[in-house]
Image (cartoon, rainbow, N blue to C red):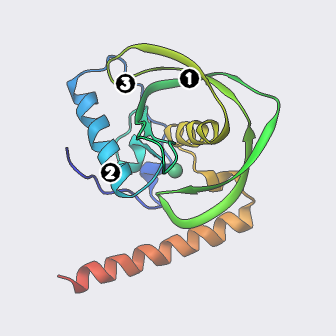
Amino acid sequence: MTLRPILIHPDPRLKRAAEAVGEVDDATRALIDDMLETMYDAPGIGLAAPQIGVSRRVFVMDVAGKEEPAAPMALVDPEILEASEELATYEEGCLSIPDVYEEIERPARVRLRWRDREGTLCERDFDGLAAVCVQHEIDHLDGRLFIDRLGAVKRSLITQKMKKLKRERAKAAAAAG
Ligand code: NI
């Protein structure tokens, strides 16, 4: 397993719609394992392949509470079959937009179909934090970030902040040689 660098917004690779995986092979499983390790290391509760520069429709997540055992999931080629009319608001963050949290409204429940790490076709309803997470990650697969759901002014301020962060990180990396 390998830790993969997480892309920071703005980056054209985060704006691209990812391609379907199809058959889940050993390369897909190796990608999933790298993504889980990278997500836990960050730490985060979800990570989509485009965030490590891989344009494939796969994401990993673990929304288990701190006191609960780890519950890693990998969702390959996920599809939203149904979304509730009822909406819920949650303060979202993203590993590609560090230290930014904004309230986003989405359907409270969604039904998903996907393939797991073994290639088994799965179907299930998600609610609560898991529903937020799967919709946020599927947005990544469609080249969309949660800040794209905010107004233009707010989004632009956040983008400026991220550009500054990237400049500072590049400078620090250069100074470290
Ligand atoms: Ni994200």
Image x and y of residue 133, in percent: 57, 42
Comes first in the chain, label 2 or label 3: 3
- Front-lying residue, 140 or 60: 60
Comes first in the chain, label 1 or label 2: 2
Amino acid bearing label 3: Val
Some atom of ligand 1 lies within 8 Å of the CB belonging to the residue at label 1 = no
User: Number of labelled discs?
Assistant: 3
Mark 1 and mark 2: span between their CA atoms? Answer: 24 Å
The residue carrying mark 3 is 21
Question: Is 121 displayed left or right of 149 in the figure?
Answer: left
Image x and y of residue 50, in percent: 41, 44
The residue carrying mark 2 is 38
Question: Is 109 displayed left or right of 98 in the figure?
Answer: right
Comes first in the chain, label 3 or label 1: 3
Question: Is 153 displayed left or right of 97 in the figure?
Answer: right
In the orientation shown, which residue stands out farthest toward the bottom?
175
Amino acid bearing label 1: Glu
Give the vertical position of 104 relative to 101 (above or below): above
In the orientation shown, which residue stands out farthest toward the front?
67
Residue at point 52%, 47% (across, down): 65
Residue at point 67%, 38% (across, down): 128
Amino acid bearing label 2: Thr
In the orientation shown, which residue stands out farthest toward the top?
121
